[in-house]
Image: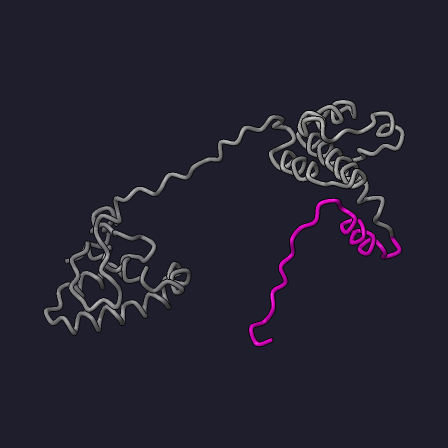
Amino acid sequence: MKTIGEYNTSREAIILKEYGRNVQKLVNYIRTIPDKEKRTQMATTLIELIKQLAPVAKEAQENPQRMWDDLYIMADFNLDVNNPFSTPDRTILFKKPRKMEYPQNDVRFRHYGKNIERLVLEATKKEDPKEREEAAIYIGKLMKTFYGAWNKETLDDSVIVKDISLLSKGKLSLSLDKVREENLFEKLYREQRKNTGPQGNDKRDNRNSRNNRPFKKNRHQHRRRDQ
């Protein structure tokens, strides 16, 4: 006789709590059915029922094998049915995930980031001196913006010019007097604010400024298969 004040701690443990206790009871019942064909039919029906009732099943519907694997796990791998997929091995529960390798790249100036070093390398490959200068100016703007995002004090232009020369091994050089006179390292977000106006031309101006950047992204056009 079931007592009214029965607690879950006194009941049988649920192996996969995301499916609930009722699903666990149905799995235990399927294990007791003597006929294999009947067990397979009931297991298939339970899978379809889980798809409708269990929220976690919505994510697993794209991978139906996962639901059958979970069924074996809830049955403690003691379930003899005609599984449409390969029967999972008990060792999968104790298999440790593969350790993710953290990139051990040496960054010379961490306040700029690794991508700045990559941009400097790409800029040094440009043969046109004017393009190299434009690329160096753009990199200087990025460096000033990135540094300001992590530090309250303003980075002096002389430091940026020196760091660009160090990162490029002297291949990228800028005149400090010209940088200060023309304010070439003005932060990028300030330029975006200046290009934004109430006349509605801000989107067109931003598109034009993106097209004038010295570094272009490779855009792959996706076409429909029937074209």
Please report the residue visible at 30 percent of the width from the left and 42 percent of the height from the top. 96
Q: Considering only vertical position in the picture, is 210 above or below 160?
A: below
Q: Is residue 209 magenta?
A: yes
Q: Is residue 13 above or below residue 167?
A: below
- Where residue 187 appears, x then y in whole percent? 78, 36
Among the 4 quarters of the image, the one containing residue 226: bottom right
Q: Position of residue 208 (x, y in %)?
A: 81, 53
Q: Main secondary structure of the magenta part?
A: loop
Where is 20 relative to 108, above or below? below
x and y, in percent, of residue 73 in the image = 24, 55
Going by the image, does 11 lie left or right of 49?
left
> What residue is rendered at 22% in x and 62% in y?
27
Q: What residue is shown at x 22% (from left), y 71% (from top)?
A: 42
Q: Is residue 46 above or below residue 10?
A: below
Which range is magenta? 198-227
Q: Nearer the viewer, residue 206 or 41?
A: 206
- Which residue, as the protein is rendered here, is positioned at the far left? 34
Where is residue 75 drawn, in percent x and y?
20, 57
Q: Which residue appears at 67% of the width and 50% of the height?
A: 217
Quadrant for the C terminus, please.
Answer: bottom right
Q: Quadrant of the N terminus?
A: bottom left
Residue furthest out toward the bottom: 226
Name the residue furthest front: 127
Left or right of 189 in this view: 22 = left
Question: Could you say which quadrant of the image residue 157 lies in?
Answer: top right
